[in-house]
Amino acid sequence: MVVLASALGLALGLVALGACSSDKAAVTTTTSSSGPPASTTTTTPPPPPTTTTVLAVPVAATGAAGLAAQAVSAEKAVRDPAVTGEALARAGWEQQVVYRALLADPALRAEVVRLVPGEWRTTVEANARAGAELRAMTPPQPAPPDNWRILAPRPLDQLLALYKEAERETGVPWEYLASVHLVETKLSRIKGPSTAGAQGPMQFLPGTWKQYGRGGDVYDDHDAILGAARLLKANGAPGRMGDALYSYNHSQRYVTGVSLYAERMVADEAAFRGYYGWQVYYRTVAGDRVLLPGYPDVPAL
């Protein structure tokens, strides 16, 4: 049995900007660490802070020229080492909002790509296409799951260290592990099962976890990332990444979407700084909802 993304990466904000396009006041929420306590056999970093400042929801610019300028501004900001903390989080979320605004309109997407300067064209096109591919896999649902909790992710540098540890152990490029993590649970922001019963930050079905988890904790970032690397390695990575990703989710759209995000990080590691700021959006029949840290105690926007 393979790992499925079913209701996770496919409903995590890879759809067009919908009902959440108005500014909200910044709030502070309290969350707990991701999943049950870490396995005592791993060297898991400490959990993320329990207090998370949620920034005002960014708004996409109007028109192709505005979106092109906004995309370039956000892409530059996430690559600027002087941009840190809340400013970096804001830039990443703004980047996400721009690409979400392009997903449902291929003509607008093509015009925005045409308008951005040449040095940014590949990046903007890849991010927009990745989201469109993943969105096409996802039908809208009646409402966000009430059995999900939205948490803060581990600090950026800790996640990078976990991906790179898994790469050293298995040879699977860290960028692909980061991309799978992004698509499946927005870097562990989501704690909750898929409709198929997949669990943990990398979304393993129980049988698959038994095969690749090696006795670890499916809810632990360290163990789950290593398990995902072992699964990908067993199915062709790094030489045949397409086959390996298809084994993770039997969809060519999934392979394309994950690969496009990964390739952006291969081209420039700083791209991960932007993806780290991406939030959880959920596609419903009434429009898209933002699920912020603290959900369901904090209402969806």
Image (cartoon, helix red, strand yellow):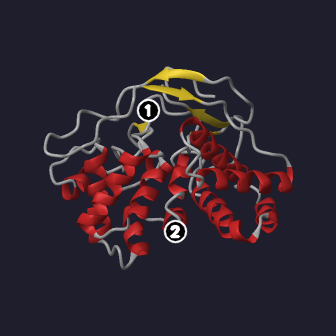
Q: Is residue 48 left or right of residue 87?
A: left
Q: Position of residue 99 (x, y in %)?
A: 68, 53
- Amino acid type of the residue tagged 2 in the rendering: Glu
Near mark 1 (Cα within 10 A), the count class, few <14, some 14-19 or many ≥20, is many
Q: Position of residue 68 (x, y in %)?
A: 78, 57
Look at 71% across and 50% down and name the residue there.
98
Q: Residue furthest front?
A: 82
| Residue 1 seen by the camera | no
The quadrant in which the N terminus is found is bottom left
Look at 66% across and 55% down and name the residue there.
76
Look at 54% across and 31% down and name the residue there.
292
Q: Determine which of the numbered discs, if any, sits on residue 50 in the image.
A: none
Q: Is residue 257 above or below residue 159?
A: below
The answer to which quarter of the image holds residue 174 is bottom left
Near mark 2 (Cα within 10 A), the count class, few <14, some 14-19 or many ≥20, is some
Q: Position of residue 44 (x, y in %)?
A: 24, 43
The quadrant in which the C terminus is found is top right
Q: Is residue 86 above or below residue 235?
A: above
- Amino acid type of the residue tagged 1 in the rendering: Leu
Residue closer to the observer: 76 or 213: 76
Q: Is residue 152 above or below residue 63?
A: above
| Residue 59 seen by the camera | yes
Q: Position of residue 209 (x, y in %)?
A: 24, 53
> Marks 1 and 2, Cα distance to the nearest angstrom?
27 Å
* Residue to which mark 1 is pinned: 151
Q: Is residue 125 left or right of residue 6?
A: right
* Residue to which mark 2 is pinned: 263
Look at 40% across and 73% down and name the residue there.
241
First in sequence: mark 1 vs mark 2 = 1
